Amino acid sequence: MAKPKVATTSLAGCFGCHMSLLDIDDRILKLVELVDFDKSPVDDIKEFTGRCAVGLIEGGCCNEENVKVLRDFRAHCDILISVGDCAIMGGIPAMRNGIPLQECYAEAYLKGPTVHNPSGRIPNDPELPLLLNRVYPCHEVVKIDYHLPGCPPPADTLWEALVALLSDKPVQLPYELVKYD
Amino acid sequence: MSATIEFVIDGKEIQGQPGQTILEAAQQAGVYIPRLCYMKGLVPHGSCRVCTVLVNGRPQSACTQPVAPGMVVENNTEKVTALRRNIVEMLFVEGNHFCMFCEKSGNCELQALAYRLGIAAPKYPYLFPTRDIDMSHPDVFIDRNRCILCGRCVRASRDVDGKHVFDFVGRGPHKRVAVNAEVRLADTNLDVRDKAAEACPVGAIMKKRVGYAVPIGQRLYDHKPIGSEIENGKK
Ligand code: SF4
Ligand code: SF4
Ligand code: FES
């Protein structure tokens, strides 16, 4: 029987949640026995090759590209999980949510203390995804089935949740594994 | 002492004293009723509604409602818990709670309640309001992003410190904790040793130069849910 597939992505995140996934240490060997990885930075597969049992989303949506990828994940994954505080509530990138977009651009490209930009132009290449007016939690963009909070969620949290889901058991995490920091 | 008042919480017989609130009588009997704006030693405010219980089927705030003989109280039931969960979720989306870098994290009563109630993510949309921070005072700061308007600072300053450093201004979404000065906390007579400087259940009024004093794993609510100390009879 073919193994179930897992896909992962980092939207507006710092890759810390992916690091935490790698932090399951030698259980990663058990994980590759349990599942195949599809689209994911872990194996560098760029496009979905088929239907996936579980999709892990790190990071919220700060630009149109994030929204596109997130919708693609929703379309391909049976179960979609928001992993970490950025996916759940926007996290550090959402600190810009109270600041007008023009001011964010000015700080990043014109006025910031380390900026060197003699042309004084704000990059506007069609290749660059447009920023959204603010950073959105994933569940405000698509339906999310589970939330695993933490910054990042501990490796044990990710492991326990994944194993439960892949063996069709309810996800019941102990008190110590569900924290917001 | 005067006669005891007998009543029932979730099927358990409780004996309270006349004049006690439901919350106090329950606590004495080792039953934890979640609370946020209640603080021992302050006049109950009854504003956060997290302590809501059903008294003979009617919602009442346990921190203000006196015990009465024969009352039947629902506390730890699915219905009441769902109600409290909604309140706590609203408090999260109505402010800006970045727990990942908050100095109060691990010792925060709001966060601990969310843990206890099993909240992985609020179901309401985040509002991301614009709130300000007052760093003017040499020893204490206010971060209004985290304020839940519980009024503990207001009551502590007024009733314990005798100072009136804090009070509420505005209504609805504009309601905020203001200081008794033109603008800045520095221009009040708040002292870092005041009760008001340590009454905040969240990270909104904090002492400076404390930072992340307690390592992760040793903080108040890292291992045991808030209220466990009451349920284990240690308080
Ligand atoms: S005050 Fe509490 S809930 Fe708010 S950010 Fe700090 S730890 Fe989190
Ligand atoms: S500053 Fe703290 S104590 Fe004062 S009302 Fe806000 S949350 Fe309550
Ligand atoms: S603790 Fe009773 S209303 Fe807040």
Image (cartoon, coloured by chain):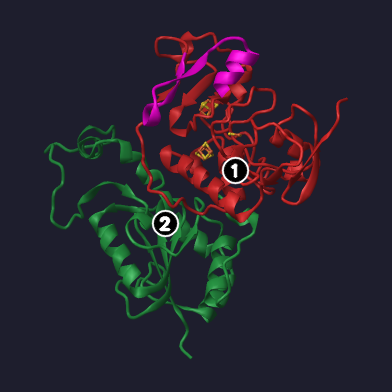
Q: Position of residue A168 (x, y in %)?
A: 55, 77
Relative to residue A18, is residue B136 depicted above or below? Answer: above
Q: Position of residue A124 (x, y in %)?
A: 13, 49
Distance in Å between CA atoms under marks 2 and 1: 49 Å
Which residue matches tag 1? B58
Q: What colour has chain A? A: green
Tally of numbered tags: 2
The one nearer the camera, B70 or B76, is B70
The one nearer the camera, B185 or A26, is B185
The residues colored magenta run B153-179
Which residue matches tag 2? A15
Q: Where is residue B30 in the image (x, y as percent from the top left)?
A: 78, 42
Q: Residue at x 38, y 76 (%)?
A: A38
Q: Residue at x 45, y 18 (%)?
A: B178
Relative to residue A60, is residue B212 depicted above or below? Answer: above
Q: Is mark 1 within 8 Å of ligand 3?
A: no
Q: Is mark 2 within 8 Å of ligand 1?
A: no
Q: Is residue B98 visible?
A: no
What chain is tagged by disc 2?
Answer: A
The one nearer the camera, B207 or B154, is B154
